[in-house]
Structure formats: structure tokens, C-alpha cells
Amino acid sequence: MAKQFVTQAANWQSELQTWFVRIGRHFGRQAMRQRALDYVTGLLSPVERKTSWQLSEAVKRQTPYSLQHLLDRARWDVDAVRDDVRTYMIEHLGEPDAVLAVDETGFIKKGRHSVGVQRQYSGTAGRIENCQIGVFLAYASTRGRALMDRELYLPKEWADDMVRRAAAKVPEAVDFATKPQLAQRMIERAVAAQVPFAWVTGDAVYGDNRSLRAWLEQQDLHFVLAVASNQYVWPDSTGQKTVAQLAATVQPQDWTRLSAGDGAKGPRWYDWLRLPLLSWQMPGERWLLLRRRLTDGELAYYVCYVPPGTDLQTMVRVAGTRWTVEECFAAAKGEIGLDHYEVRSWHGWYRHMTLAMAALAYLAVLCRHEKDASSAKKTGNC
């Protein structure tokens, strides 16, 4: 048994080195490529806190200075690495019916010098905290899930403060952008890169943004986006109503009990129904999707733009896929130190996040391979 684990660990390390050859070309000299590989290896290690000192110890470096240099002063193309991580994910996890899930997560910080930090609401903490906010795009298919793209939310107070911008090395071209605008940029990049997907999903931060919904419809990109109860929609040509007003018109027999996918404790059962919305001159159909919690009857609302003939179960499946991005955050923070960074600069934040995404993608692909191998053994095809 011990020999089996040693062999398996060696295979994992070999696969990591093979995968890293692709992104290693963006780091120039061999010494810099080795530093980047060491950084990702350290993120994948079992050390509890993945700061520069702990990562250095994990990869047998005497000091953290070379890894700190990698995130700060070294010259390498972070967006090119991001693109290669995306390609790697699609090669191993890609499916035409996949879902892009957008969400933000908070990184609690002390002081006021880390780029973008201020007192703002963090869904991660569930309250207002001194934190940075990152907006992420996750890719979810039946083959696996991982974070595909990232953008740092720069509050308007930061965007307008030339002194703080200069200290944090925020590029001159960066202007204030809302979280939905950042989400749109990442979806645009996925479309331009011909990422295979069929759906976009996200919470009410994105669903409540009419500009984002309109842009998705104009691109004929189908979505199931959560919205707040006070959001207005067009049920017909007579006028707008809030989604809560429409929900009040449904009858008890209209609900259908369906699972939104498996959670930590098994299938996530809710009652669901959908109401048609005005779809005049649209290539797809618009719907209002309602979800009712079994324990207390609390309602959740989703505005949907779907291909003609889409059934309720498919819409429920996409709505349930939104939780995959939260699972990615949990895995990234718990396993690879997504939130353990010590950098303050704009480029330092993007460099750490991108290398952490590379580590998470490797784990997702490794998990996929392990599942495939296990299935092959069970069916006798190994």
C-alpha cells in the first residue's frame, strides 16, 4: 500500500511538471520558471498558511525573497498565463453544455494600503469588513469545475485617488468598473476564446443589473440569473410588475418539487415553478423562475433567457450550478491559499490569483483523471 501511494505521488508530480511546461514559457529564464513552479507546488502542499515564508519552507528554499520577487518585480505576462490555464481547463473539463458561474468573494485585510481595500460588504463574511473584493468566473461541467478568470474590484474612492493608485501601482488605463461590468469583461473573454458553454448564472448582484442582462440577450447567451424581489419584469405587453407581485399570483398546485443538484448532504430539494415573460422578437424565451424552500417557504427569484423549448428541469439545473463557484472558493481558500497572499500591489494581486487558479485547475483535472480511472476499473476497461 505504501509503495502504491509513493508511485501515485510521483505520478501527480510528473503530471504537474508536464502541465507546467505550457505556462512556464511565459516566465522567461529557467530560474524564473522554477520559481513559478515552486510557488504553485507550495500552494498545492499541505502547509496550513501559505504565506511566502511557509511556501519557501515547503519547497526547500532558504528564504522567501525569490518567491516574493516573482509576485512583485519579476517580468512575466500574467494574462498569458491566465489564458493557458483556461485552455488547459477546456481541454480536460470542457463540455458544450457547461455553465459559466460569476460571483465575488472577499479578502479581509488590515490597514488601507492593499489595492482596492476599504470597508465594504463582503458576502464571504456576511457583513461590512475592511477587505478587497475579487470577481471571479468559474467553469462548471459534468467533468469538473474550477476558476477560469478573475478581476479585482476597485472601488470608486480608490479609482479617483491618484496617490493611492500610484502607491499600489494601479495601471493608468484602469478606471472604475462595477462588479457586473467586470463580469461582462470575463464573459467576453470566454466567448472570444471560444470556450464551450451553454449557460451563464450568478446571484442578484449580477441578475439585478439590466445592462448585463440586455448584453447577454443581445449576444444570444442564455442565462439563469438570480434577482431581488423588487425587480421589474414584463409578463406581457400591458406593463411591468415586480417578480414578487407575479409570485403572489401562483397557485399551490403550480409548484413542482425538483432537485437543484447534489450538495454536501445529498440532493438539494426545492419547489419550483416558472412563469412566461414577454419575449417579443427575441430568438430565445424569457421566463421568471421561482424557487420555494421546503423548510419555511422562503422564495428566491430568477430571470431566465433560454433556448426555445427549454424544460423546467434544465433551468433548475442551471440555477443550482451557481453554487459551484462558492464550492470553488471554498476549495481554493481551504486547499491552495487563495486568500493567504501578502501582496499589496495591483499586479501582485493578479499574479497570486492567477497562479492559485493554475493550482486549482490542476487539482480539478487530477480529480477528473482519478474518477475516470476508478470508473475504468469498475467496468473492467483498465
Image (spheres, grey):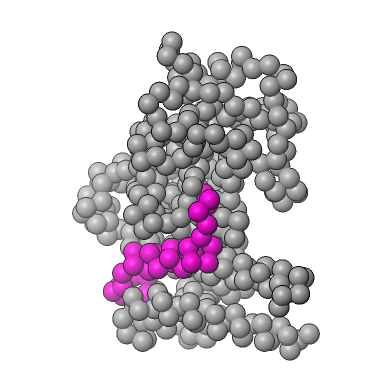
Asked whether 196 or 327 is in front, the reply is: 196
**Residue at image x 73%, y 45%?**
267
User: Looking at the picture, does residue 126 appear above or below residue 168?
Assistant: above
Query: What are the residue bounds of the magenta stretch?
Result: 70-99
User: Looking at the picture, does residue 182 appear above or below residue 315?
Assistant: below
Residue 144, percent from left and from top = 58, 60
Residue 111, percent from left and from top = 41, 53
Is-magenta flag for residue 79? yes
Hey, which quadrant is residue 63 in on the image?
bottom left
The answer to whether 67 appears left or right of 249 in the picture is left
The answer to whether 239 appears left or right of 5 in the picture is left
The answer to whether 234 appears left or right of 290 in the picture is left
Asked whether 352 or 132 is in front, the reply is: 352
Q: Quadrant of the N terminus?
A: bottom right
**Secondary structure character of the magenta stretch overall:** helix
User: Looking at the picture, does residue 152 appear above or below residue 69?
Assistant: above
Asked whether 262 or 113 is in front, the reply is: 262
**Residue at image x 61%, y 15%?**
248
**Residue at image x 46%, y 58%?**
148
Residue 315, percent from left and from top = 58, 37
Residue 226 appearing in the image: no
